[in-house]
Amino acid sequence: MSPKSAGLAAKMGYTNLKVMLKGAPGWKKSGQMVVASTKFIKSGNIVLVDLRSTKDAAAGHIPRAINIPLTELADAEDDFPAMKSQAPIILYGNQADTKKAAKTIKGWGYKAIATVNGGFAGWKLAGNPIATGKMSSEISWTYKPGKGEVGIKEFKEVVAGKFANKVILDVRGPEETSDGMFANAINIPLDEIEKRIGELPKDKEILAHCSTGARADMAVQSLKKAGLKAKFLVANIECEDGECEIEE
């Protein structure tokens, strides 16, 4: 998507263009951090962790956050959700502590780790709501499939050929699919979906996937507009040596 977007920008007259080919997944894989949106922090199905001391957190914190000081984090692994590829973990504290915590949690197998832009100070400065008082350290999180999502269990069953009335659609690009694809999946890159919709069966439910779920979601919107029944998978998918795995 990025090269094509840059191409469109070039046609519009922009000349100072660069493309990060591996996108956000590549950015995170290299050990870099991402920040969560304000909306996601306020209403998303997340685990929001305040890494500051109990005293500082009680004086002011982000609503919905739980308090696990960095000094206690190493002993809290068993308290985190079991669905490591599905649970979004959002951290805030000072920059050094946040990086240390992210490294620790990533080592446990969690993939969706982000920070609050500017930490608590940045949140407060932006005029966002804050809460005071003693905080809980108990994590309470359950997976809630979003509208239009397909669960990992159902997706795997379709890959295994258990449902003849459903088909897998891979919307990744050729560079990614060269590393591997799920058996019997149909590959149509996201930017070709609208002009190639006729290649998809109208009598089957289509389950779209990419490497994370973002492009699959966009593809499903196009499929639904065309009258097709479709869902998308939100999960990290790794392909290597011709084989693909869903990280759970």
Image (cartoon, grey):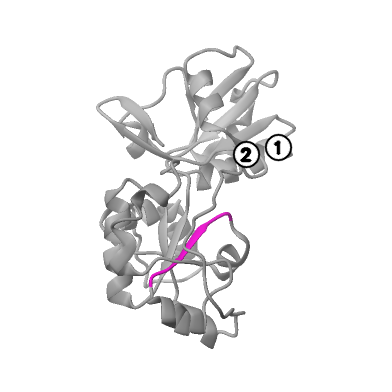
| Residue at 70% across, 30% down | 228
Q: Secondary structure at mark 2?
A: helix
Q: Position of residue 6 (x, y in %)?
A: 43, 60
Look at the numbered discs 1 and 2 and tell me whether their residues touch, using CB distance below 8 Å.
Answer: yes
Label 1 sits on residue: 224
Label 2 sits on residue: 220
Q: Residues within 10 Å of mark 1 (few under 14, many from 20)?
A: few
Q: Position of residue 143 (x, y in %)?
A: 56, 43
Q: Residues within 10 Å of mark 2 (few under 14, many from 20)?
A: many
Q: Is residue 70 above or below residue 109?
A: below
Q: Is residue 145 above or below residue 230?
A: below
Q: Which residues are magenta?
A: 45-51
In front: 70, or 111?
70
Q: Quadrant of the C terminus?
A: top left
Q: Secondary structure at mark 1?
A: helix
Asked whether residue 118 is in view, the answer is: no
Q: Does the stretch in magenta take in 101? A: no
